[in-house]
Amino acid sequence: MRFVFPFTLIFCILLTGCRQNLHTPDDNPPVNSNNNIKVIYSIPELREIINSQGYSVEESTDKQIAFRANGHIIQLYKLEDGDLLLSFGFKKNNNISFKEMNEWNKEYRLSRGFIDDEGDPIVETDLMTNGGISKKNITEFIKVFTNVTVPKFIRKYGM
């Protein structure tokens, strides 16, 4: 009788773990008309979202949009699977070491910093879409990057 509780507990834990709903890129979750949840947004839809936030689109192609936010050019890339990537970088007169850049990656978990081939600092962040996203998700993604991440990156590495 004393072994019944541990076995029951283990069974419940295993059962709960097996019931997780994991999506693969091939999954096509249903669209929720109330929240406009979609897996892939088009470039025109993304431009509309950017414009609705008051940012000015500088240029766009079928895979990326460059827009101005707080005086800085931000790149929004739409990847093949629908995922979104925001990127910001600037020319730096003095070199930043890899060790200094790794400090960013240790401190800030929702973005990654790196040094490009010319030695300039770049910060990026991703938004996965395979579970579906709404316009609100994209708006918050852009807002946090432009109003929080980029200013912190500039303060840390100068411009």
Image: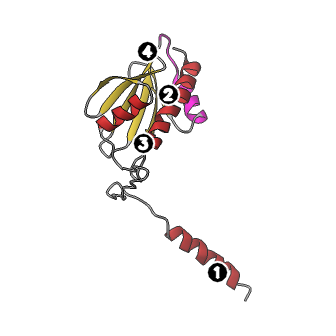
Q: Is residue 133 left or right of residue 12?
A: left
Judging by the rendered image, the residue that carries numbered circle 2 is: 146
Q: Is residue 96 above or below residue 129?
A: above
Label of residue 7 in the image: 1
Coloured how?
secondary structure
Q: Which residues lie in the magenta part? A: 93-107
Q: Nearer the viewer, mark 4 or mark 2?
A: 2
Instruction: Say which quarter of the image contains residue 31.
Output: bottom left
Dot 1 alpha-carbon crowd within 10 angstroms: few under 14, some 14 to 19, many 20 or more: few
Q: Give the CA separation, mark 3 to mark 2.
A: 16 Å
Q: Magenta stretch: residue 128 in it?
A: no
Judging by the rendered image, the residue that carries numbered circle 4 is: 91
Dot 2 alpha-carbon crowd within 10 angstroms: few under 14, some 14 to 19, many 20 or more: many
Question: Earlier along the polypeptide chain: callout 4 or callout 1?
Answer: 1
Question: Earlier along the polypeptide chain: callout 4 or callout 3?
Answer: 4
Q: Looking at this view, is 57 or 154 the one in front?
A: 57
Question: Earlier along the polypeptide chain: callout 4 or callout 2?
Answer: 4
Question: Earlier along the polypeptide chain: callout 3 or callout 2?
Answer: 3
